[in-house]
Amino acid sequence: MYQLEEPIYFYLLFAIPVVAVLFLLVLFWKHRTQKKFADSNLLRKLSPDRSTFKSILKISVFCLAITALAFALVNPKIGTKLETVKREGVDVVFALDVSKSMLAEDIAPNRLEKSKQLVTQIINSLAGDRIGIIGYAGSAFPQVPITTDFSSAKLFLNGMNTDMVSSQGTAITEAIAMARTYYDDEEQTNRVLFIISDGEDHEGNLAEIAEEAASEGIKIYTIGVGTTAGGPIPIKRNGVLQYYKRDENNEQVITRLGEERLMEIASQANGKYIEGNNTKEVVEEVTAILNGMDKKEFDAKQFTDFKDQFQWFLAAALFLLIVDILLLERKTAWVRKLNLFNEKE
């Protein structure tokens, strides 16, 4: 386990391409200026010790020094002490719809990114709870098992996309069935499942599976993302729009928020439907729901002691700067004597 104390200093890495571009401009300027006074053969005879390779080597070492210095300022910390601590909370599982309809941009930036923002902000508002994440489209898949490691959960959440499931559809029944396996603590009385979806094309016997979940003490809350007016489904490649999805009749598909379906699922499992367009309101409502539940005490292992690692990167930066200072731009004598490139006639 590691921590980054001051990640803002990673912005120093943007200095590297700036330095590289300036270096190339200087090289170009030197080359053009020298050509005004003599041709390349004469210049080689006038300055036989001049080495372009050594100049490139010097700037490369300097850029490595900047990189090491940036990491030193960020100060990575490595966990060295793992302890079992007492926590109180609720088991919360998020089932995120990653079907193609979630690419619709009727809510900015699109339904899927909005859903990921909602889940991230909800996780940020949690304290002693345990969380898990499931993704689903034509089938369901486990993304994050039940855990107290919120940082890792958010990392995996950010990587979710519509290409994770090859088969399209909305297998919400599979997602609910998988969520039932996440709650591994039999003594936990409060089990919560949040389904984040646009409510389109839900398949299977939802009423039956929702009732079974409710009988196991699982409360299902649905969060609808999208608008009832709907929008087309853009298909992009590397961020560039290629086309909008069309049906078998070659007509543009318009996907709309299916609130009624989401309300039905929530009502069958003693939960509630939440409109997901306003992030702040969603987080406040979810926080109020979880705070109103009884918290169960459980043991969780976590790192309680972290050691600074900046000194290694600082030492590397100083070493590289010293090497850069001592590294001269003229050719190395013993290398020149080897005549590796048959320069001597």
Image (spheres, rainbow, N blue to C red):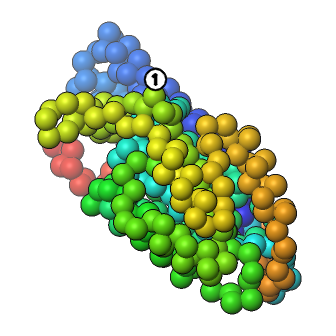
- Residue under the point 24% across and 55% down: 340
Q: Quadrant of residue 154?
A: bottom right
Residue 279 in view in this figure = yes
Q: 329 or 177: which is nearer to us?
A: 177
Q: Is residue 321 left or right of residue 202?
A: right
Q: Residue furthest top?
A: 36
Element at label 1: helix
Q: Is residue 166 above or below residue 48?
A: below
Q: Position of residue 8 (x, y in %)?
A: 71, 44
Q: Position of residue 216 (x, y in %)?
A: 62, 81
Q: How many marks?
A: 1
Q: Position of residue 260 (x, y in %)?
A: 51, 47
* The one of 34 and 130 positioned closer to us in this rendering: 130
Front residue (pair 252, 331)? 252
x then y, percent, for residue 307? 79, 72
Residue that mark 1 sits on: 26
Query: Residue at left 23%, top 26%?
Result: 41
- State left or right for residue 111 relative to residue 246: right
From the viewer's perspective, is 225 left or right of 121? Answer: left
Horizontal side of 316 relative to 202 (left or right) equals right
- Of all residues shown, which one is farthest toward the bottom? 186
At label 1, the amino acid type is Val
* Image quarter hosting the N terminus: bottom right
Q: Is residue 243 above or below residue 76?
A: above
The quadrant of the rendering that contains the C terminus is: top left
Q: Residues within 10 Å of mark 1 (few under 14, many from 20)?
A: few
Q: Nearer the viewer, residue 254 or 215?
A: 215
Q: Which residue: 27% across, 60% down?
A: 167
Could you tell me if residue 158 is visible in this image?
Answer: no
